[in-house]
Structure formats: structure tokens, C-alpha cells
Image (cartoon, grey):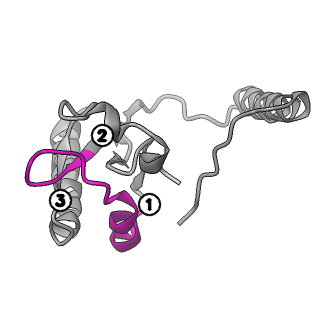
Amino acid sequence: MGSHKVSLVKDVATRQQCMDYLLKDLRALERMIERGMFDRGVRRMGAEQEFAFVDERWRPAPVLMEVLEQVKDEHFTTELAVFNMEVNLDPQKIGGSCFSDLERQLGSYLAKADKISSALKAHPILVGILPSIRRSDIGLKNLTP
């Protein structure tokens, strides 16, 4: 499992380093486009879904890190706060049963997240922004490490 280290840019040298990394990524993307490294002809779609973990009172439940430790599945990843998570679904060829396949896959991941989080007295819900969030829930203590 990887980790994210986020900090504020406080000096010109760090800002320049960030810009250098961004430009390096853009040059890599440009080379990939020039070399035809992206599929052609086959049309695919992908999807991601945010989950929010809530407790029995529908309040944010900060169980993300424990769930990720137990789930051991690269489809699941962090989000901004320790009470929400993202699941990345597999790309699907457009056509046939692609939407049903996405729905089945999402359902299985939701069940997996629910099984793990239930043991932590929390449950995932499919929502981007949790309506029950309060100002006190927003702060450094709830940012994903």
C-alpha cells in the first residue's frame, strides 16, 4: 500500500520542483500520443465511484485506512478524507452488457467494503459529498495521510 505525503509549498525552489515534475509528466504524455501508445479502434469506458463511510448516526466514520489494510485490492484507493474512499472499476468495451457488468462489479466492491467496514461499526454509502458532514469534520485530523 502506498502513502501520500502532502505539504504546502512554502518556497520558490519547491514550487519550481513541482512545476518540473508536472512538465515532465506532460512531456511523457506527449511522447505517448506521438508514439501511438493509446488504443485505437476499440472504444472503452471506465468509471470510478466514491464511497463515504458512516456510523450508525450517519456521521462520518474515519475507517478508511483500516479498510484499505484489510481489503488488499488495488481497485480501492484513498480519497481526501479518512471517511471516504474511491473504487476504480475495470475498463469495459462499450457495447453489449458493459453497463450491467459495471453495475455488477460495483455491487461486488460495495459488498466487500461493507463486510470489512461493518466489523469497524461503519458502512459505505455511494455519495460524493456526505450531507451529514460538519465543519468540525473538516480539518487536518481527518485528512488522508
Instruction: Please give left or right for residue 85 compared with residue 113 in the image.
Output: right
Nearer-the-camera pick, 95 or 129: 129
Query: Tag on residue 122?
Result: 3
- Amino acid carrying label 1: it is Glu
- Residue drawn at (72%, 31%) of the image: 29
Disc marking residue 49: 2
- Pick the residue in front: 61 or 96: 61
Q: Which residues are magenta?
A: 52-73
Residue located 23% across and 60% down the image: 113
Compared to 120, does 96 lie above or below?
Answer: above
Relative image position of residue 45 (x, y in whole percent): 37, 33
**Residue furthest toward the right?**
13
Label 2, label 3: how many angstroms apart (C-alpha)? 18 Å
Q: Secondary structure at mark 3?
A: loop
Q: Residues within 10 Å of mark 1 (few under 14, many from 20)?
A: few
Disc 2 is placed on an element classified as strand
Q: Are marks 3 and 1 in contact (CB under 8 Å)?
A: no
